[in-house]
Amino acid sequence: MSLRTHRDQFNDLQWKTLEYAALGLTLTQSCKKAGYADPGHQSSVLRRDKKFTNELEIRLQRNIDEMKITRNKVQEMVMEAFELARTVEDPNAMVRAASEINKMCGFYEVEKAQIELSNSQREFVGRLNELSDDELIAMSSQAKNINPALEMEQEAEHLEDIVDAEYTEDS
């Protein structure tokens, strides 16, 4: 990865955004600080700009290389923060530090959920699986017209009616 920058490839606002993002601000914060009128939209646009994202990656990598930050170093810093929090008897800071250590070390167990479907739900899923892509798209466009205030059960019944209608038309 080249560490050269290409100033001439970016306008002033993009360049300022790069500088702020390289300092650690989020892309939306960087766009706001650079002066964009709609920072949320502009950050979305810049995320899709390969030239911009490549330059940002280069700058971030340069920062990491210059500071010689490694995963172990970050873990050590969090441990130091934990010890400091213990010294000043700040339980909230201790919990936050312990939480960060757990995340970094991967100690949080993956949550597993088992979902059991009723017979009617299994039948419904089976009917959905039998539909073609075109039928599913048609269902989706019909489903967009559902009143959002309906209860979930009413929505499910409506979708079942749509599936039934599509299913019987093809049978």
Image (cartoon, rainbow, N blue to C red):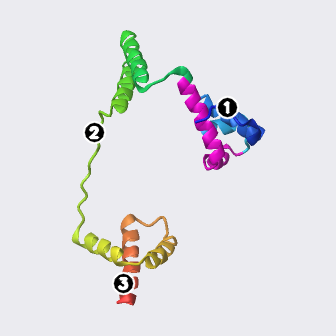
Residue 137 at x, y percent in the picture? 48, 74
Is residue 146 depicted above or below 98 in this figure?
A: below
Residue 25 at x, y percent in the picture? 60, 32
> Residue at the location (33% across, 30% down)?
105
Are circles 1 and 3 on residues that touch, CB within 8 Å?
A: no
Check disc 1 and report the residue beneath it.
19
Quarter occupied by residue 101: top left
Distance between mark 3 and mark 2 Cα atoms: 42 Å
In the image shown, does 9 or 170 lie closer to the viewer?
A: 9
> Mark 1 or 3 closer to N-term?
1
Is residue 102 depicted above or below 80 in this figure?
A: below
Distance between mark 1 and mark 3 Cα atoms: 57 Å
Is 117 covered by the magenta stretch?
no
Are circles 3 and 2 on residues that touch, CB within 8 Å?
A: no
At numbered mark 3, what does the secondary structure look like: helix, strand or loop?
A: helix
- Front position among marks 1 and 3: 1
Q: Main secondary structure of the magenta part?
A: helix
Check disc 3 and report the residue beneath it.
167
Residue 109 at x, y percent in the picture? 27, 39
In the image shown, does 80 or 160 lie closer to the viewer?
A: 80
Give the amino acid at mark 2.
Glu
Give the amino acid at mark 3.
Tyr
> Residue at the location (26% across, 71% down)?
122
At numbered mark 2, what does the secondary structure look like: helix, strand or loop?
A: loop
Tell me the number on the disc at residue 109: 2
> Residue at the location (36% across, 82% down)?
164
At numbered mark 1, what does the secondary structure look like: helix, strand or loop?
A: helix
Range shown magenta:
38-65
In the image shown, does 114 or 27 lie closer to the viewer?
A: 27
